[in-house]
Image (tube, grey):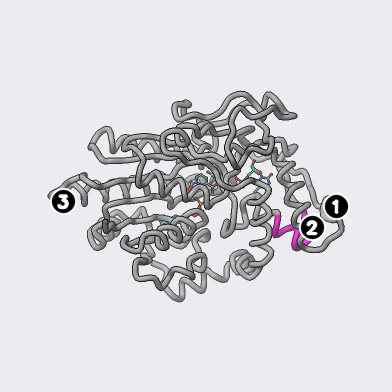
């Protein structure tokens, strides 16, 4: 069946992996990638699919409701997968208004454009879906009751090699929202708007809440790519607080595989948690990155250990995130496919082999390049 799918934020980290998967897997679909190309959006992430007949790029701001309306009509969009957002917690602490504008008002503009367009069609909401990509951070923080780790109660093929949990509680789909950062507060608000559009207007919606992603094309302000790049330049590795915060890491390709499955098979009005069953303390992640990066760079063992620098903690720093994604596992048969050791090795290799990409992004050169190509609307 032919479909016209609008992916917002498709030039960002997760969005670019999703667009690549959809363009390659569904030659009959038209994939419209809508992105404002903020500092975090980069079309070189998609050079391998840019010329495909089933791919279109639109430079636009999700807050521009008239333009959202025109794009819905122009491409006769029947499915929206909404990823566009300001995504970095540290930036939200210094600039909360930008997060409210994009994540809350932008999502509302997009919802309203979809509603207006779909309600104008003779078939109405039949065959339509607004799928909103959210985060586990909306649930707040879990306690870290077992700092040494306990055997995880979950088993998956990818996590069978003795992974740990750092507490007995996990986020489930019914966990009460309790966001702490301006970023997570803005994502929580956007989630509520999406559900309100279902409950009030009958719009078919789905929300998923995912844990920390890692992999190629992540902007090097986030922990893993930042630290790989700093090791390459022998710069300090700023570990917040004591490095005891726990995150649940998922390889980005496993996330977009889940998004594809949920978009096609998920139940309307449902929420699905997506996670890696893969908890790590930050300091252990940092030591793992150092070990792999030093080996791949040919440095002596322990060469970069001295770069670890404990710095003032992030304000409102959530202690532990851990996702229970058994609903998705049992209802739709998804689970992570990649063991963390393999995923992180693949990731470090990618950043070391793609230093031009990292250098362009960190110098801001690509922004000027793309403004010269697409203008600065
Ligand atoms: P990212 O920052 O790498 O990419 C965001 C993209 O959105 C960029 O291409 C940017 O140009 C675009 N964008 C920003 N503002 C826009 C606007 N006003 N109009 C149009 N485009 C705009 O983010 P990411 O890490 O790929 O995250 C994508 C989504 O997934 C976000 O909604 C985020 O909250 C969510 N998420 C991320 C993670 C993670 O670990 N990275 C985990 C769970 C959920
Ligand atoms: O949980 C999902 C979320 O994961 C997504 O919704 C966000 O968009 C994404 O950015 C990510 O948020 P985090 O704040 O967890 O990711 P970040 O990479 O910024 O930080 C990971 C952990 O590492 C966190 O505990 C803070 C710590 N950290 C981070 C940086 C950048 C450091 O100790 N030092 C650093 O320099």
The residues bearing labels 2 and 1 have C-alpha atoms spaced at a distance of 8 Å
Assess mark 2: CB under 8 A from ligand 2? no
Residue 63 rendering spot, x and y as whole percentages: 36, 53
| Left or right: 359 in relation to 368 | right
Which of the two residues, 337 or 207, is positioned nearer the viewer here?
Answer: 337
**Does residue 182 appear in this view?**
no
Residue at horizontal 69%, vertical 35%?
Answer: 162
Among the 4 quarters of the image, the one containing residue 144: top right
Q: Measuring from the top left, give residue 213's x and y in whole percent.
A: 56, 47
> Is residue 317 at all visible to an observer of this figure?
yes
Q: Which residues are magenta?
A: 228-236
Quadrant of the snapshot with the C terminus = bottom left
Q: Quadrant of the N terminus?
A: bottom left
Q: Residue at x 75, y 29 (%)?
A: 148
> What is the distance, in whole Å, between disc 1 and disc 3 at their CAs?
63 Å
Q: On the rendered structure, is 267 left or right of 275?
A: left
Q: Secondary structure at mark 2?
A: helix
- Looking at the image, is mark 2 or mark 3 earlier in the sequence? 3
Marked residue nearer the N-terminal end (1 or 3): 3
Residue to which mark 2 is pinned: 294
The residue under the point 77% across, 54% down is 236
- Percent of width and height locating residue 104: 40, 44
Disc ID at residue 302: 1
The picture quadrant for ligand 2 comes to top right
Disc 2 packing (10 Å; few <14; some 14–19; many ≥20) = many
């Amino acid at each position: 069946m032919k479909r016209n799918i609008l992916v917002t934020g498709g030039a960002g980290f997760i969005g670019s992996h999703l667009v690549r998967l959809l363009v390659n897997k569904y030659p009959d679909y038209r994939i419209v990638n809508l992105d404002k190309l903020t500092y975090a959006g980069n079309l070189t992430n998609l050079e391998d699919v840019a010329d495909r007949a089933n791919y279109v790029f639109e430079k636009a701001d999700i807050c521009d409701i008239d333009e959202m309306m025109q794009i819905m009509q122009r491409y006769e969009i029947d499915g929206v997968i909404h990823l566009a957002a300001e995504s970095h917690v540290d930036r939200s602490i210094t600039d909360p208004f930008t997060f409210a504008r994009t994540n809350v008002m932008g999502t509302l503009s997009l919802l309203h454009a979809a509603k207006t367009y779909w309600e104008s069609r003779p078939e109405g909401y039949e065959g339509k879906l607004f799928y909103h990509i959210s985060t586990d951070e909306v649930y707040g923080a879990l306690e870290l009751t077992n700092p040494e780790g306990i055997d995880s109660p979950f088993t998956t093929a990818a996590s069978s090699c003795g992974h740990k949990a750092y507490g007995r509680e996990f986020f489930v789909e019914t966990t009460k929202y309790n966001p702490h950062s301006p970023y997570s507060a803005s994502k929580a608000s956007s989630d509520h708007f999406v559900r309100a559009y279902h409950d009030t207007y009958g719009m078919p919606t789905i929300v998923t809440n995912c844990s920390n992603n890692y992999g190629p094309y992540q902007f090097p302000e986030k922990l893993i790519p930042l630290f790989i790049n700093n090791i390459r330049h022998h710069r300090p590795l700023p570990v917040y607080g004591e490095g005891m915060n726990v995150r649940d890491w998922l390889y980005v390709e496993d996330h977009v595989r889940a998004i594809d499955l949920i978009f096609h098979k998920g139940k309307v009005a449902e929420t699905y948690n997506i996670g890696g069953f893969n908890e790590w303390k930050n300091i252990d992640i940092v030591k793992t990155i150092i070990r792999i990066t030093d080996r791949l760079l040919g440095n002596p063992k322990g060469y970069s250990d001295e770069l670890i620098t404990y710095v003032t903690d992030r304000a409102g720093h959530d202690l532990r995130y851990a996702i229970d994604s058994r609903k998705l596992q049992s209802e739709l048969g998804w689970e992570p496919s990649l063991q963390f050791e393999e995923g992180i090795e693949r990731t470090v290799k990618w950043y070391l082999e793609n230093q031009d990409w990292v250098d362009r992004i960190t110098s801001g050169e690509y922004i000027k390049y793309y403004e010269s190509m697409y203008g600065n609307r």
